[in-house]
Amino acid sequence: MQSRVLGRFTKHTAGFTNTRTNSKTGGSLLALRGDERRWTRSQTKSLIVQAKQAKKLPDLRIDNKSLAAINAKRRYLRIAGKLGNDPGCPKRKYSEAELARLDHYGWHLGWSARQIHTAVVLPNHSYHSISKKMGRLAYGDPLRVQRAKEAKRLTDVEYRCLKEFLLNDGRQSSSETIAQQFNISAKVVNFHRCKLGVPLSWHDARALSSTAEKRQRIAEAKRKDLVQHWAEYRARKIETLLEFQQRLERRRCQAPTRTCRACAYQWFALPQFFPVQRRRVANRVKVSMAQTCRICKMKLKQEHEVRGPEARRHKETRHAA
């Protein structure tokens, strides 16, 4: 039994050494990466000194180390007794009932970690603990997770520059212009404006130059949305009218027919297929039926809306010439 185990071990180590010798470049890269991640004595001593000064995690600064790495190293030092007699707050493991609640709210209901923490669903766990646990369990909306990963987060230097700009020159600029300058969203700019007590009034926002461009963009987006909405409505209406015509033909309806002037198709002379106009004349009301069916009218209107911007541009250029 012992010889068998030793044989497996030697075979495994032999394969490992062969792979290491065959891929010298990959091994050297891994070694360099490991050296970069390894804590040096000076970094450890600096962390111990800062931790004993009762600094909080955001105030701890170690070169080439992230906050997550600093927090993990601080926990190991605290467990080893390097930071004094305070053992720190031990990790709270999730019980079965808490995991069931997290599964219900985070997976089935689609709540975010912020919503779960605000609703006090898990009172013994912080927001970061809930967020990390949901990430390990692959809960949450994938789009929201991707958006959070790609979000722009200001550093201390960038935040100081933004704060100084908002308090001085930023009063004469719109939120969209500042957002483009600092590569952040306009919502972040508005949030910091309200936080600093320098929000734009309605008249100031209207007076800025970029608001006119913003109104044009919004109007163009609304116009495209309306065009798409009415196109879908006309498609549904045409389908309904064709189905109604076929149903009347199957029932052998006795209503008179009327030929459309545009499509030359015989429709039933009913208000559902031809628009009816009523005009008041002297002592009576004159009722007339259009010669073009509703389907042709809708198609002509849709073509006119599609060609509308081009026709307007052509008209403007012709007048300018």
Image (spheres, rainbow, N blue to C red):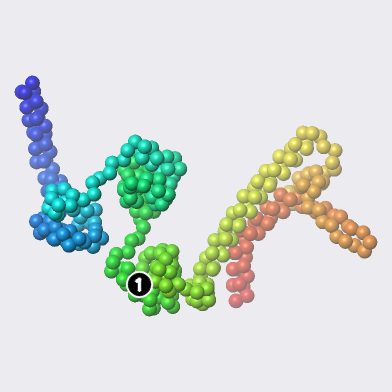
User: Which residue is drawn at the image coordinates 43% and 64% (left, top)?
Assistant: 187
Q: Nearer the viewer, residue 63 or 209?
A: 63
- Location of residue 221 by image quarter: bottom right
Outermost residue, front side: 85
Q: Position of residue 235 (x, y in %)?
A: 64, 47
For label 1, the crowd category at 10 Å Cα-Cα, with few meaning under 14, some 14 to 19 and many 20 or more, is: some
Q: Nearer the viewer, residue 118 or 24?
A: 118
User: Which residue is drawn at the image coordinates 36% and 58% (left, top)?
Assistant: 151
Which quarter of the rendering shows the N terminus? top left
The amino acid beneath tag 1 is: Lys
In the picture shown, does residue 86 fall above or below 171? above
Q: Disc 1 marks which residue?
A: 163
In the picture shown, does residue 86 fall above or below 98? below
- Does 122 sit left or right of 205 as displayed? left
- Does 181 sit left or right of 34 as displayed? right
- Does 140 sit left or right of 136 as displayed? right
Q: Position of residue 6 (x, y in %)?
A: 6, 27
Q: Nearer the viewer, residue 10 or 289?
A: 10
- Location of residue 223 by image quarter: bottom right
Residue 76 in sight in this render: no
Q: Position of residue 73 (x, y in %)?
A: 18, 52
User: Which residue is drawn at the image coordinates 38% and 41% (left, top)?
Assistant: 102
In the picture shown, does residue 52 fall above or below 315? above
Element at badge 1? helix
